[in-house]
Amino acid sequence: MLDIAEELDRWITEGRDFAVATVVGVSGSAPRPPGAALAVDGEGSVVGSVSGGCVEGEVYELCRQALADGETVLGHFGYDDADAFAAGLTCGGTLDILVTPVRADSPGRTVFAAALAAAARGRAAGLARIVSGPDRLLGRALCVRPDGAPLGGFGAHPELDRTVAAEAAAFLDAGRTGTVETGERGARCGAPVTVLVETSVPPPRMIVFGAVDFAAALVRVGAFLGYHVTVCDARPVFTTRARFPEADEIVVDWPHRYLERTATDSRTVLCVLTHDPRFDVPLLRRALRLPVAYVGAMGSRRTHLDRLELLREAGVTARELARLHSPIGLDLGARTPEETALSIGAEIVAGRRGGTGVPLTGAHTPIHHDVPDRAAPRTGSPV
């Protein structure tokens, strides 16, 4: 639901009633993960997706029905060999989809409004909803802020609210979406319950060092992938808004000095395109000691070997050097700045999602990897 927060926040601000269908369970190969959502308002307008098209028509009708009767329902969709016209997933997987009305008279509207407003404005928020358990609790929600304080509740046992709020705070801290089984604590409500926790956190950072033509293309790819993109270079004549209109930030400073003072975390990716030992060595010496997701540096194999030698002389250890992705990117045969940026983005995505970077045609690997975001992608071939 939080993946379409901007649209739903606008609908709530405009006073619209709507129903939202959220993927709450996935088995086998399925096109969208838990948390993916589709919403329908009272006029029939649609935003979002739960299946890439396979079951959208039937989910649309479930949303319309939920808007009409105010009832939350849980739908199950799979592949039906017996009925070629039945709604189902041709990929062979199954989806559980929770359909919840959010009307003016819905008791959870204020909870949804708080979570959607935070997510739409780039602030951290967690939304926990009961997706299985007693029928009277299905779809009940609470919102968790970064300090762990909950808003709303399930209207059952206070211990259930406390337990789920604590779990949701942990999910929020890690930026994860997933389910929580309450076990005995949930049994106090009449039966154990399962809760889907969705989180929205500020976008991860991509810092591009080097105001070069390759950087301009990489800024566009980074923005497309959902990163907050910063361009940093010590040369003011090249580091301008006119050259990088799509960057979120433009910084004129020596790269290593900027990296020392700016905030990074385990989702941050650092792309070093400066291609100059004066910048590269002090920058990479600092970067390779930070707990970031990815550190890549552009250059030929000859440049890479020379750079490694200089880094060793600067005191960078073998363990730290092993984290460096250079030559940067996957082997796409890239030549233009745009192709090169695509290869860098592909390497970053492969690392986040546990991909191999090999063609899917003829491969015996899963299309969707059931792996959380990783700290560092695999090393690729040269650009």
Image (spheres, rainbow, N blue to C red):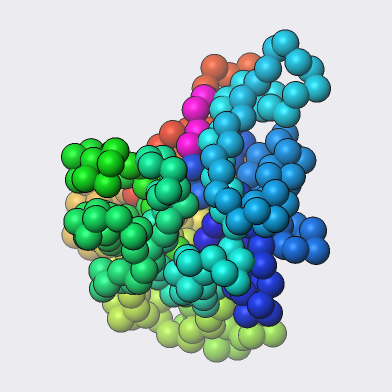
Answer above or below: position of 200 versus 97. Answer: below
Q: Is residue 104 left or right of residue 166?
A: right
**Percent x, y for residue 4?**
60, 61
Q: Nearer the viewer, residue 250 or 58?
A: 58
At x 24%, y 55%, the residue is 157
**Percent x, y for residue 83?**
76, 15
At x 53%, y 81%, the residue is 249
Quarter of the rendering containing residue 243: bottom right
Please state the extent of the stretch shown in magenta in the rendering. 25-29
At x 63%, y 80%, the residue is 13
Name the image quarter holding the N terminus: bottom right
Dominant secondary-structure state across the stretch colored magenta: strand
Q: Nearer the viewer, residue 367 or 59?
A: 59
Res 117 seen here: yes
Res 228 seen here: no
Answer above or below: position of 73 versus 311. Answer: above
Q: Nearer the viewer, residue 255 or 13?
A: 13
Instruction: Check if residue 97 falls in the magenta segment.
Output: no
**Percent x, y for residue 205?**
45, 67
Q: Residue lying furthest top in this view? A: 82
**Percent x, y for residue 324?**
36, 50
